[in-house]
Image (cartoon, rainbow, N blue to C red):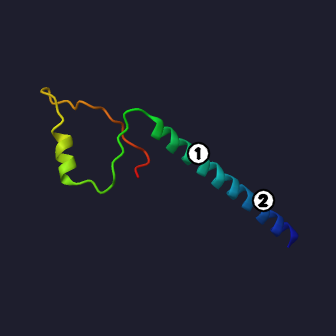
């Protein structure tokens, strides 16, 4: 019984450490992505009007004028 409790403590500590590490990694990556230049933050409830204005921002060659990266963690 004592070995089972010791095993559970070790497993719990490992899971807690991994959870903390992944949480800090997510916060760090999210913060770095917010520091990237040219990133446009848009609210998830964008309207069709926003999409049509984005489609109208094309040059005569058909290429978009602004190059914004895809976000890994959309809000």
Residue found at the very far right of the displayed protein: 2
**Closer to the eye: label 1 or 2:** 1
| Residue at (33% x, 55% y) in the render | 44
Residue found at the very far left of the displayed protein: 60
Q: Position of residue 70 (x, y in %)?
A: 36, 41
Q: Is residue 62 left or right of residue 17?
A: left
Of label 1 and label 2, which has the lower sequence position?
2
Q: Position of residue 29 (x, y in %)?
A: 52, 42
Report the residue marked by disc 2: 10
Distance, label 1 to label 2, CA atoms, is: 22 Å
Indicate whether 45 appears above or below 8: above
Label 1 with label 2: CB-CB less than 8 Å: no
Question: Residue 4's quadrant in the figure?
Answer: bottom right
Indicate whether 67 appears above or below 34: above
Q: Position of residue 41 (x, y in %)?
A: 36, 45
| Residue at (47% x, 36% y) in the render | 35
Q: Is residue 60 left or right of residue 12?
A: left
Specify few, some or many for label 2: CA neighbours under 10 Å numbering under 14, 14-19, or 20 or more.
few
Q: Is residue 24 left or right of residue 45?
A: right
Report the residue marked by disc 1: 25
């Amino acid at each position: 019984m004592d070995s089972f409790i010791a095993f559970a403590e070790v497993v719990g500590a490992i899971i807690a450490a991994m959870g903390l590490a992944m949480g800090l990694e997510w916060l760090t990556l999210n913060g770095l992505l917010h520091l990237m230049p040219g990133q446009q933050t848009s609210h998830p409830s964008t309207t069709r009007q926003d999409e049509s204005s984005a489609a109208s921002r094309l040059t005569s060659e058909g290429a978009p004028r602004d190059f914004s990266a895809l976000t890994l963690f959309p809000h």
